[in-house]
Image (spheres, rainbow, N blue to C red):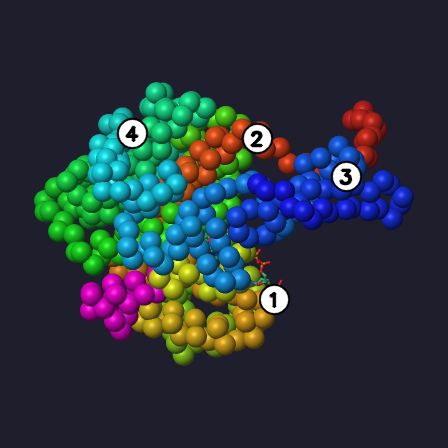
Amino acid sequence: MTPSDVKATLTFSDGSPSVELPIYKGSVGPQVIDIRKLYAQTGRFTYDPGFMSTAACSSAITFIDGDKGELLYRGYPIEELAVNCDFLETCHLLLYGDLPNAAQRADFTKRVTSHTMVNEQMQFFLRGFRRDAHPMAILTGLVGGMSAFYHDSTDINDPHHREISAIRLIAKMPTLVAMAYKYSCGQPYIYPKNDLSYASNFMRMMFATPCEEYVPNDVLVRAMDRIFILHADHEQNASTSTVRLCGSSGTNPFAAIAAGVACLWGPAHGGANEAALNMLEDVHRTGGIERIGEFIRRVKDKNSSVKLMGFGHRVYKNYDPRAKLMRETCHEVLGALGMGNDPILKLAMALEKIALEDEYFVSRKLYPNVDFYSGIVQRAVGIPVSLFTAVFALARTVGWIAQLNEMIGDPEYKIGRPRQLFSGAVRRQVKPLAQRV
Ligand code: SDX
């Protein structure tokens, strides 16, 4: 952080002494007013429940310019990474700060590939769930349960433990997500095959059976890999902030990542891809394109709780660059599968066109986000809707780990402990039962 020449002065109309607050600037993006000493100097807190104007940390991993619709992983534009790299190269970039050269790429791939199996005992966790359990319920349990197995990589303050747990989590998430899927459909688990690429391995564990091999389709594998890249990290979103806050207590990395999985599940966050596809299928089922006008009216009606899922974003007030890339992938995949006339895709594009011209959405700067098209691609690949958010969690695991490790490696970090504006009952006496009216 570089001190700015500009200072902030806070004055009070009640004559309380004014305070001067330092301002810091990063390499790009908004500057920050350092309020760490504000309470000690003024006896007052700041108030920002949704963190609309609060930087919770300093980070060098991912930068988003919401107005421009720009997303950079360690300075590289997402558009360039999506075309020129694969997911494991992106993982190396997020974790270690730069793209790997050929030797580093081979070494990192080998390290991840040799950790793809999970302990055989983990399969017995799944038996405790009903077959119709939501995959995110299962994944939250399985990821947290990893803490019970890997005692040689649970000390978050040991850099070697952090390195091993990072590799284990990245390597095993595809295996765990595929196991959750196989459990839900009563098929046997498929072991990872280490001669396959990361995305191919995941798709084979999902769709192969002991009775017949799964021959990955290159277009679908590339689409899956791109979905992983686009979802890998996104600065201090709700689930990443959850992982940071959880990890700040010193808990083990598996527990902190399990907290991120739980947070991502919500429909306002990672659960939006499942909700967006369910929304599209509902509209399709109840009249399709002919009924879009009525659906949009319900979305705009303040008395209805209907939202256009996959639209809007706390940071992007322009088109989410990931949504643009996902839309391209949509056309590539559905075209390759002969689904170019897919009614759900056509419905999505019609909804997008209307929303981008409608004053309600334009005035609120509501654009498609990453979740609007990702579900259509996943559905075409054969991923069941209920597994969409688990795929998001699989991809986001590397971002959560990179952010967690950055925090733990920051000498200034402390356990996160927000304060509050208290509006409850002030001190009062307990009355004996007989006197309570
Ligand atoms: C992800 O943070 C991240 O980076 C997240 C993420 C990541 O990679 O980690 O990008 C992944 O979570 C993407 C977002 C997925 N969620 C959805 O698609 C769910 C639908 N979107 C909304 O719930 C909403 O847009 C949020 C939660 C995404 C953002 O909400 P904000 O920033 O708190 O904005 P808001 O709810 O205050 O909305 C502002 C206005 C409101 O109307 P008014 O009160 O001004 O009349 O816009 C309206 C909202 O009602 N609005 C919508 C809407 N989103 C916002 N109206 C209809 N449909 C929507 N989708």
- The reply to whether residue 129 is visible in this rendering is no
Q: Quadrant of the N terminus?
A: top right
- Distance in Å between CA atoms under marks 3 and 4: 49 Å
* Residue in front for this viewpoint, 292 or 112: 112
Of mark 1 and mark 3, the one earlier in the sequence is 3
**Measured from the top left, where is residue 251 in percent x and y?**
48, 26
Q: Which mark is residue 122?
A: 4
Distance between mark 1 and mark 3 Cα atoms: 35 Å
Question: Does the stretch in magenta take in 341?
Answer: yes
Residues 45 and 380: in front is: 45
Look at the numbered discs 3 and 2 and tell me whether their residues touch, using CB distance below 8 Å: no
Horizontal side of 351 relative to 437 (left or right) equals left
Residue at 32% x, 65% y is 328
Q: Earlier in the sequence, mark 1 or mark 2?
A: 1
Label of residue 412 in the image: 2
* Residue type, label 4: Met
Looking at the image, is mark 3 or mark 4 nearer the viewer? Answer: 3
- CB at disc 2 and ligand 1 closer than 8 Å: no
Give the residues drawn in magenta, as a range.
Answer: 326-342
Residue 407 locus on image (x, y percent): 50, 34
Residue at the location (57% across, 30% down)?
A: 412
- The residue closer to the viewer here, 355 or 328, is 328
Q: Main secondary structure of the magenta part?
A: helix
Tell me the element at label 4: helix
Q: Nearer the viewer, residue 269 or 36?
A: 36
Which amino acid is tagged 1? Lys
The residue indicated by pointer 3 is 44
Residue under the point 52% across and 75% down = 358
Q: Is residue 300 above or below residue 158?
A: below
Q: Please name the residue that numbered disc 1 is placed on.
A: 302
